[in-house]
């Protein structure tokens, strides 16, 4: 119940922030579960271009000579593709956050009506279970109290039925 209330409160906050951002010609970026308002590129594009200051505020990434970096993590910009990532327009330098998401295989979704972009976990953060389609092992008791592990059924078809009261 507590988690549900937190989720509702977070969703309400994001909706209110996106409505305000849309009125002011800004977008809301949800990155690592945190909503941040960013300036909108004046040029029409299907991609999300943000100024470097907003890139850092929304994602904690910065553009360095070695690539797009956060703490010790650094993703080099592919040779010959710098213009797809960075663009100097007037006095501002803009960064293509959508192109970065494609580079690091990060799912992204946008809602133009509410001026919001959502970025999921990068490929390196998602773990190997989805990549291998192999479920992690676990052990549960049946109605008679006998323990059963998923690993006992490797190589066999298994149907898992789950239920929760929430």
Image: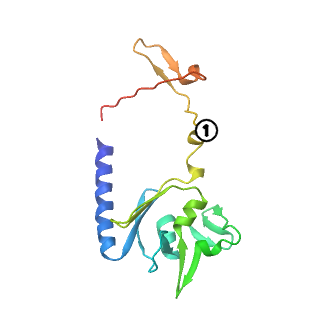
Outermost residue on the bottom side: it is 90
Assign the C terminus to one quadrant of the image.
top left
> For the point 55% across and 32% down, which residue is it?
136
Mark 1, residue position: 132
Outermost residue on the top side: it is 144
Above or below, 54 against 9 in this view is below
**For residue 48, side relative to residue 70 (left or right):** left
Above or below, 54 against 15 in this view is below
> For the point 51% across and 70% down, which residue is it?
56
Give the mark count: 1
Assign the N terminus to one quadrant of the image.
top left
> For the point 55% across and 61% down, which residue is it?
101
Please state the horizontal and vertical placement of residue 50, each as a whole percent of the image: 49, 73
Residue 23, by quadrant, is bottom left
Above or below, 60 against 2 in this view is below
Please state the horizontal and vertical placement of residue 11, each as a whole percent of the image: 31, 55
Residue 130, by quadrant, is top right
**For residue 2, side relative to residue 146 (left or right):** left
Please state the horizontal and vertical placement of residue 145, each as a whole percent of the image: 43, 13
* Viewer-closest of 117 and 53: 117
**For residue 81, side relative to residue 99 (left or right):** right
Q: Secondary structure at mark 1?
A: helix
Colouring chosen for the image of the structure? rainbow
**For residue 49, side relative to residue 112 (left or right):** right
Please state the horizontal and vertical placement of residue 148, each as a whole percent of the image: 51, 18
Q: Residues within 10 Å of mark 1 (few under 14, many from 20)?
A: few
> For the point 29% across and 68% down, which residue is it?
19
């Amino acid at each position: 119940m507590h988690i549900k209330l937190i989720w509702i409160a977070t969703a309400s906050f994001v909706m209110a922030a996106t409505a305000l951002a849309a009125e002011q010609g800004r977008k809301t970026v949800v990155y690592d579960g945190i909503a941040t308002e960013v300036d909108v590129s004046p040029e029409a594009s299907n991609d999300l271009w943000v100024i470097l200051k907003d890139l850092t505020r929304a994602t904690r990434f910065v553009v360095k000579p070695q690539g797009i970096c956060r703490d010790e993590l650094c993703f080099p910009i592919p040779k010959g593709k710098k213009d797809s990532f960075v663009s100097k327009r007037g006095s501002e330098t803009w960064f293509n956050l959508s192109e970065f998401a494609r580079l690091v295989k990060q799912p992204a979704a946008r809602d133009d009506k509410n001026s919001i972009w959502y970025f999921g976990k990068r490929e390196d953060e998602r773990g190997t279970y989805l990549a291998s389609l192999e479920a992690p092992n676990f052990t549960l008791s049946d109605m008679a109290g006998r323990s059963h592990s998923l690993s006992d059924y490797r190589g066999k078809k298994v149907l898992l039925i789950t239920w929760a009261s929430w």
